[in-house]
Image (cartoon, grey):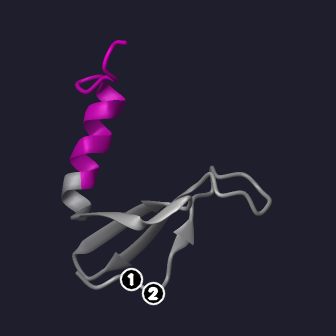
């Protein structure tokens, strides 16, 4: 896998120089996500797959595990 060159920080990350944010990079037909405090670990997916996951979360079809 080729590591994307241009990462964009989430607008929900807050200000400052902290490392508590999600970053996104895109390539043709692929999205790459990583946490700024662990930039070596990258999750790669397609826009359609991510859209399905986000929709399932919004509608309650996917919920966090109970602890």
Q: Are marks 2 and 1 in contact (CB under 8 Å)?
A: yes
Q: Residue at x 29, y 39 (%)?
A: 55
Please tell me whether residue 38 is drawn above or below residue 8 in the rendered image. Answer: above
Magenta residues (range): 50-67
Q: Position of residue 27 (x, y in %)?
A: 31, 81
Taking 66 as reference, is 27 above or below it?
A: below
Q: How far apart are labels 2 and 1 at the CA level?
A: 4 Å
The crowd level at tag 1 (other Cα within 10 Å; few <14, some 14-19, many 20+) is few
Badge 2: residue crowd in 10 Å (few <14, some 14–19, many ≥20) = few
Q: Secondary structure at mark 2?
A: loop
Residue 46 at what x, y percent from top left?
A: 21, 64
Please, which residue is most extreme toward the right here? 16
Secondary structure at badge 1 equals loop
Residue 41 horizontal/vertical position (percent): 37, 63
In the rendered image, the vertical position of residue 24 relative to residue 35, given as above or below: below
The residue that label 2 is drawn on is 5
Residue, disc 1: 4
State which quadrant residue 26 falls in: bottom left
At x 26%, y 62%, the residue is 47
Image quadrant holding the N terminus, namely bottom left
Q: Residue 65: image x %, image y %?
A: 31, 20
Query: Which quarter shows the C terminus?
Result: top left
């Amino acid at each position: 896998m080729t590591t994307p060159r241009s990462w964009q920080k989430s607008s929900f990350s807050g200000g400052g120089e902290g490392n508590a944010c999600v970053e996104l990079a895109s390539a043709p037909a692929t999205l790459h996500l990583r946490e700024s405090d662990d930039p070596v670990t990258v999750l790669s997916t397609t826009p359609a797959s991510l859209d399905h996951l986000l929709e399932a979360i919004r509608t309650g079809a996917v919920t966090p595990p109970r602890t």
